[in-house]
Image: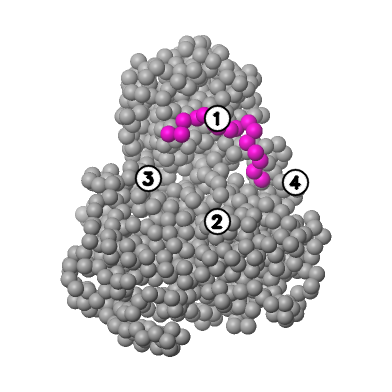
Amino acid sequence: MPKIALYYDDSGYVETINRPTRVRPDMPVGLMGRQVAGKEFLDAYLSYGDWTELVAVVPNPTSAASMRETCRSHASSFDKTRRLDFVETRRFIESFGDEPPARVVHFPCPADSKYAWARQHGGRHSFALCGVTHTLCSATGIESLRNLVTAPFQPYDRLICTSRAVTDMVRSVSDAYAAYLRDLHGGQPKRRLSLETIPLGVNTSKFRPATREERAAERSRLGITDHELAVLFVGRLAHHAKAHPFPLYRAASLAAEATGRRLHLIISGWAASPAILDAFKEGARRFARGVRCTFIDGTAPENRFAVWKAADVFASLSDNIQETFGLVIVEAMASGLPVVATDWNGYRDLVVDGATGFLVPTMLVRHATDDLTVKLIVGELNYDHFLAHASQNVAVDVSATANALARLASDDALRLRLGQAGRERAQTMFDWKHVVAAYEQVWRDQQLERHRVSRLRARKEEMHRSPVYPPLETSFAGYPTSWLDGLQLVIADAGASQRMQEIHSQPLTNHEGDGRCTESTVLAIVLDQLAEPKSIAEIAQTFRAAGSSHVAASATIAWLLKYDLLRTVQRVEAKRGESRPSDAVLTFVVTCMGRLSFLQQTLPHMVAQEGCEVIVVDYSCPESAGDWVEQNYPTVTVLRCPGETTFHRSLAKNAGGFAALTPWICLIDADIVLSPNFAKDLLPRLTPGEFYRANLVGEGTGGTIICLRSDFHAIGGHDPNYFGWGEEDDDLCDALEYMGVRESFFSADRLEHLSHDSDLRMRFHERIDRHHSHLINRMYRKAKWDITRLMDVPLDDGARLAANRELYRQVSAKVNEVQAHNSATEIVIDMGSTNWKLVDARGTANRTLVYRLQVDQGRGVMEDDTGK
């Protein structure tokens, strides 16, 4: 075994219990999970490690004294003779030169990049670095992952990830940043450090099944009767940063009602403040109806280990991205308890569904979290609020949780069988002696690989617009059981409209509302509309029409799912064909309302394109276009938007665009015929940072636009304020260019437009006068973009959407006035004032936009005196 150096300071290996009354506001309260894990790891390494000499790298003499005392008093020191040496960090470069005292340096966290730089200064390959992950979703944590690409780590360095989900997250973030650097600077930057997945361990002697006498004594102490099923939760009471209690409360209530069994929730934890603890208790009173709840201090010595002996079942429904493993899960299994846990990040590595417990599904709605990581990076959200916003978008399947608890409550033999299987799994897979052996094997491999450094082949990854910290959908893709896209069907839960007011009024269940729609009237309207299943994409358009951004719309749907107001149902109308291409690069999005005859001619040409998918949006088509597509083209995805009487082109295209999953999308009308090699010739040319239109936009072809799906999301898709005919496509291109995406072109010869008259074009619009509709839309587009560029405002923002909706109303009224009275009028927009400074004077400049409309040969035209 090569000699190992452990980086040691008390914060990584010594448990501290911070109390709310004595702690700084910026410090975590209670037990810190990484300290518990670090203490247990060091104890196990001293007990089971195959070593005779150990080096401790310490930041100061105090840490050295702490490490020395830990080793001196440890039980293993009484029967083993081993050597312990110290190196202070201020002498690290001097000590770890060409002949370092140890060949592997292990950290209780991701290895600090400064030691990789220190290795560059000394003997370049003289030692290897190793670290282990804990919470990584903070801005600092993500910076450490970016450093994996830019710092001089080597292939023989290791980052040990405690679960497969964390391994995938580290890959996602580091690979996205490497791809960004390749695009910016060229070359082949990549993460050279290797990843290993090794779980945390458990002391199966300390955590063991209770004897009959121990169980009786502990239940008596806590006031739990023999007839009650005791369901235990252990952990931090942080609804925003650990596990929201609502699913457990409601599921316990439903299970008790279904089985007639008395359930008793034991909440053994610690809260950051009395207010949070009170919120948990009030939540239990409101949502865990019919269930007894006992709250105890989980950090108190008399509770910390004894409480496990009182329980019949352990439940932990984590819904937070800061969770990476779940040490309490293996502690519960070692204690012989069946486990009900969420199918979430590291939890799914621990529980074998149906064998040691039950995993209940978790859900995240696509696009609901798109803007959270960038808000954290720029400081718009602090870390706590970032976690809270993220948590508010995670839904736990309450019905599945209730069913799991009901099964366990009704079947004593099942509880015993699952508990015994969990105990065996903990002993054979998670006992610390096995985990320490896995660590030592990694360190041996590092020592061997250090002698044969080789270059790794770079992986080609899809570019992401936020490589500094990719959105949660990328970074934490492997955490939930499933990601719900725009095609997922949902339905209102029975009694949702009545329960919504209570849930909306409670701080426990209604916080971080600035990222979603919180208007009770709008929420009530949506729930009333969902007596029958509808797709997420369709519901999102309702929120969009009410002024929500596409992110806020998705986040609102996620919130409704989280609190069991909405439920998912099996996809019936909106499903993807099983034979769709798995490597598709581009999705054609085509809408249809009364144009089935055209679609029958054009759809075969889209389906025939290689490397492409097709989504047809049946926008309440009176000819049932969706039925025809499903009958004749089963590989095509059909998205239905029923109940519409007029055609809203922006909302229809957005529904399809937000449902697409391929990197690129092509918005195309139902009357466009593609050339046979359209995709084959164009796909190799597609370049991030560009969007594509025909080089000559003729009658009917202006709606064919190709762009990155991520760019379409970033601008919020088509502006939903447009009504009637005209300008939506040019407006989309304006938005892409405003975001810095360059316009590029393909030959117009690749498109053929099926000609038709204007009556068909305006058939399902509110305004039947095409020129009148076009004038309103063009006037609105002109004013909108003048204001947007002058004010430098974000595009997909709820306040901006509402302001644009009012602008559209004013423009419509003015155009109607001109047309009705055969006169001229002005639209005056006050842009506020701006300060200026000259060499010897200061002043204020007032900005006003003035648009003049007048009648010209019976039609309205406009002029503008912009920026007066």
Magenta residues span 567-583
Q: Residue furthest right?
A: 260
Mark 1 against mark 4, which lies toward the viewer? 1
Residue marked by disc 4:
494
Crowd band around label 2 with a 10 angstrom C-alpha radius: few (<14), some (14–19), many (20+): many
Q: Earlier in the sequence, mark 1 or mark 3?
A: 3
User: Which mark lies nearer to you, 4 or 2?
Assistant: 2
Which residue was labeled with disc 1?
577
- The quarter of the image holding the C terminus is top left
Q: Return the residue found at the far front.
A: 79
User: Could you tell me the amino acid type at mark 3?
Assistant: Arg
Per the image, the residue denoted by label 2 is 348
Q: Is residue 485 left or right of residue 421?
A: left
Q: In front of the other: label 2 or label 1? A: 2
The residue to which callout 3 is attached is: 465
The answer to which of marks 1 and 4 sits earlier in the sequence is 4
